[in-house]
Image: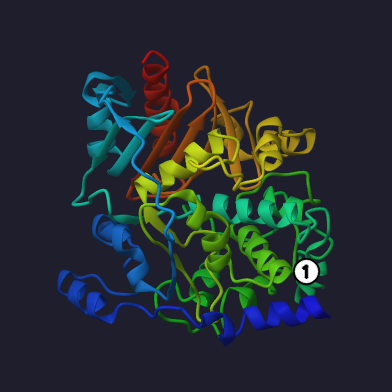
């Protein structure tokens, strides 16, 4: 009952004491260019809105604290993207052309250990610009769950309803937190082409500023999901509700809002260069599946920490090392579930665990945080390379974008850094 009370408190107004409302001045200014709060995430506007996404919705400010890391990266410019080539459908092009013209990339940072091999900020961005990271957010939500589990607050083997009693009688009843984290819950949610989510979910969270659904926030939508298509643990299905349930469970288990938990456990210890913004719904719940906005350089710092066994620039253990080791090892359950999912065609020997992909492509084995418009963090242990990038590819869920990024651009860059 105590858990239920905590969950109820966190989903109500009390969690929103530091929530920031939409930026009406900014929203009014962009209307002169045909952009509204209802249409801000349309493909036509990605170049303008993705670096400013948090301004269109309620959001939390995630402070970096005072432990900003000194600049220890050695900027040697050892990677020239214009000299590297990969293929598109109509032939070979240099990587810079593929990124800027074909993938609508906005920024990229490439590290090898503590060497800054390359960085660029296009589309009017600068090193201090934040960018909507979309589903890269999912990986952060799962890392926070891993921290909560390491502290003995969250049991990943427990069923969802043990932390979220309101979910008894829904499709999530009896599903373990781990199967939720691994996208193996078996949910039956019809979605339109090119979307990973039900439009009713978008409306309930007021992602576009209006809500005629009669649902007050993300949780109200989640408890309407009644059916499962598969037995839990058998099929990898990429669906946002899993991440939202995971985020709510972290809040219930810790008694702390997700954005504050990120600030306390990671952001103030990362040595982040700037604030992050985490978008939220009308109830104050964070958009755990896709609402983080951060600097590309700070995303690269997170990748560096993942390759450093979860330790920050001071050698402090921030992310549990056991959590990271389990990602790299995988298990029979996630491998089998991946094999029947649609992404197995891209990387047959990969898996998805704790909202993070482990991929083996082109002779490179790496972890990937992935957003649907070209927001990516890749970390390869063998070469100690991190690639952090943000973009505004106009269509989601496309073979073309995934093929260009993961079969062409990423392996080409990793090939190059292996020899530097």
Judged left or right of residue 351, residue 92 is left
Residue furthest left in the image: 32
Q: Residue 137: percent from the left, percent from the top?
A: 51, 55
Q: Residue 358: percent from the left, percent from the top?
A: 60, 33
Q: Is residue 398 visible?
A: no
Foreground of the two, 343 or 274: 274
Q: Residue 412: percent from the left, percent from the top?
A: 38, 21
Compared with residue 106, is residue 327 higher up or lower down, i.e. above or below?
A: above
Foreground of the two, 171 or 258: 258
Residue, disc 1: 163
Tell me which residue sits at (71%, 39%) in the image: 322
Judged left or right of residue 229, residue 137 is left
Compared with residue 319, is residue 48 higher up or lower down, i.e. above or below?
A: below
Looking at the rendering, which quadrant does residue 409 occupy? top left
Judged left or right of residue 148, residue 402 is left
Tell me which residue sits at (40%, 30%) in the image: 114
Q: Residue 410: percent from the left, percent from the top?
A: 41, 28
Tell me which residue sits at (50%, 76%) in the image: 281
């Amino acid at each position: 009952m105590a858990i239920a009370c905590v969950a109820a408190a966190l989903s109500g107004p009390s969690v929103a004491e530091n929530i920031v409302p939409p930026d009406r001045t900014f929203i009014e200014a962009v209307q002169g260019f045909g952009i509204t709060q209802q249409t801000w995430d349309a493909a036509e506007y990605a170049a303008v809105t993705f670096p400013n996404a948090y301004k269109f919705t309620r959001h939390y400010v995630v402070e970096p604290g005072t432990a900003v890391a000194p600049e220890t990266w050695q900027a040697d410019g050892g990677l020239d993207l214009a000299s590297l080539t990969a293929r598109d459908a109509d032939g070979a092009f240099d990587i810079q052309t593929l990124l800027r013209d074909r993938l609508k990339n906005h920024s990229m940072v490439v590290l090898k250990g503590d060497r800054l091999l390359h960085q660029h900020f296009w589309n009017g961005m600068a090193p201090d610009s934040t960018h909507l990271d979309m589903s890269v957010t999912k990986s952060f939500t799962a890392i926070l769950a891993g921290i909560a589990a390491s502290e003995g607050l969250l049991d990943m083997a427990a069923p969802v309803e043990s932390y979220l009693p309101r979910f008894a009688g829904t499709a999530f009843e009896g599903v373990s937190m781990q199967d939720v984290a691994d996208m193996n819950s078996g949910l039956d949610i019809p979605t339109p082409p090119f979307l990973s989510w039900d439009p009713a979910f978008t409306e309930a969270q007021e992602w576009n500023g209006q809500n005629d659904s009669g649902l007050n926030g993300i949780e109200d939508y989640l408890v309407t999901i009644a059916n499962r298509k598969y037995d839990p643990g058998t099929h990898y299905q990429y669906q946002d509700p899993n991440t939202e349930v995971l985020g709510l469970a972290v809040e219930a288990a810790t008694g702390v809002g997700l954005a504050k938990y990120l600030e306390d456990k990671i952001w103030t210890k990362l040595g982040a260069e700037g604030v992050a913004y985490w978008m939220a719904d009308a109830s104050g719940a964070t958009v755990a599946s896709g609402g983080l906005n951060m600097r590309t350089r700070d995303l690269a710092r997170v990748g560096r920490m993942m390759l450093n066994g979860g330790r920050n620039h001071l050698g402090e253990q921030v992310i549990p090392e056991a959590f990271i080791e389990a990602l790299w090892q995988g298990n029979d359950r996630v491998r089998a579930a991946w094999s029947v999912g649609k992404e197995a065609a891209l990387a047959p020997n990969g898996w998805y665990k704790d909202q993070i992909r482990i991929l083996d492509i082109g002779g490179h084995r790496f972890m990937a945080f992935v957003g649907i418009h070209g927001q990516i963090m890749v970390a390869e242990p063998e070469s100690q390379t991190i690639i952090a990038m943000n973009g505004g590819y106009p269509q989601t869920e496309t073979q073309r974008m995934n093929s260009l990024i993961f079969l062409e651009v990423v392996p080409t860059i990793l090939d190059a850094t292996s020899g530097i």
